[in-house]
Amino acid sequence: QQQVRQSPQSLTVWEGETAILNCSYEDSTFDYFPWYHQFPGESPALLIAIRPVSNKKEDGRFTIFFNKREKKFSLHIADSQPGDSATYFCAASGASSSFSKLVFGQGTSLSVVP
Amino acid sequence: ETAVFQTPNYHVTQVGNEVSFNCKQTLGHDTMYWYKQDSKKLLKIMFSYNNKQLIVNETVPRRFSPQSSDKAHLNLRIKSVEPEDSAVYLCASSLDREGGTEVFFGKGTRLTVV
């Protein structure tokens, strides 16, 4: 069962453009939605996260948009830079659950072309 | 330095052998995990340990077993490796067992089964 779906699988944008990565989830008890990025040869690291109390979270060039009704959330990377090229994973977990379990999407490979 | 440390970085072994991977975290976290990342970069949780208790055990083959001596250590043993076990195994930790907090990953152990 795939609880978190991510698209597109790969994305190429020009430097300066906004990259948009999308995720959807099924479990309505999920209430924590982070995005991780993974550079080649590195391990995943937290980029930004949101909780459903708000529908938008910004951190510099990175913004999460959250739609609770549609169970969707997206990551927007404004003014994309070649250094942003990496694999991005959305994830979800239920803070109200007794188990700590972060479910990851399939990943989006982002390439930013100079 | 506080982080999640894994050994070895790489391991090549033959089908049917037993392997063991070590993981230590110096972050003072309560929960540790093992994730498997396959060649398509899919991240799947294998085990989760909180205070030496197994709290998440996904449907992994029985040849895999986690081993913990204390909350700072979580090792992974594979009794008789198979070709499909070739992957990167990522150890991780988080502060609490109820999710909703950042998960910190180690650099991973790349297993190749020949």
Image: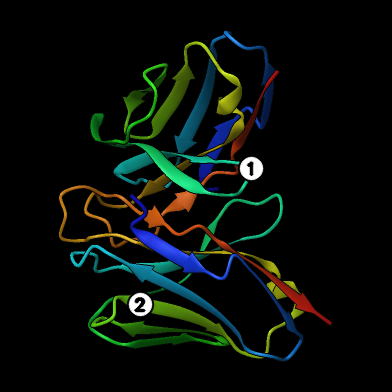
> Chain ID for label 1?
B
User: Residue B56 vs residue A19: left or right?
Assistant: left
The x and y percentages for residue B41 are 59, 49
| Residue drawn where x is 38% and y is 29% of the image | B60
Q: Which mark is residue B114?
A: none
Structural crowding at the residue carrying mark 1, measured as other residues with C-alpha within 10 Å and reported as few (<14), some (14–19) or many (≥20):
few
The x and y percentages for residue A57 are 40, 85
User: Residue A96 vs residue A109: left or right?
Assistant: left
Extreme-front residue of the structure: A1
Q: Amino acid at mark 2?
A: Lys
| Residue drawn where x is 58% and y is 87% of the image | A61
Q: Is residue B86 above or below residue B50?
A: above
Please give the residue where the numbered disc 2 appears in the rendered image.
Answer: A72
- Element type where label 2 sits in the image: strand
Please give the residue where the numbered disc 1 appears in the rendered image.
Answer: B39
Are the two marked residues, 2 and 1, in contact with CB atoms closer than 8 angstroms?
A: no
The x and y percentages for residue A15 are 76, 86
- Element type where label 1 sits in the image: loop
| Residue drawn where x is 49% and y is 48% of the image | B43
Q: Amino acid at mark 1?
A: Ser
Where residue A31 sits, quadrant-wise, is bottom left
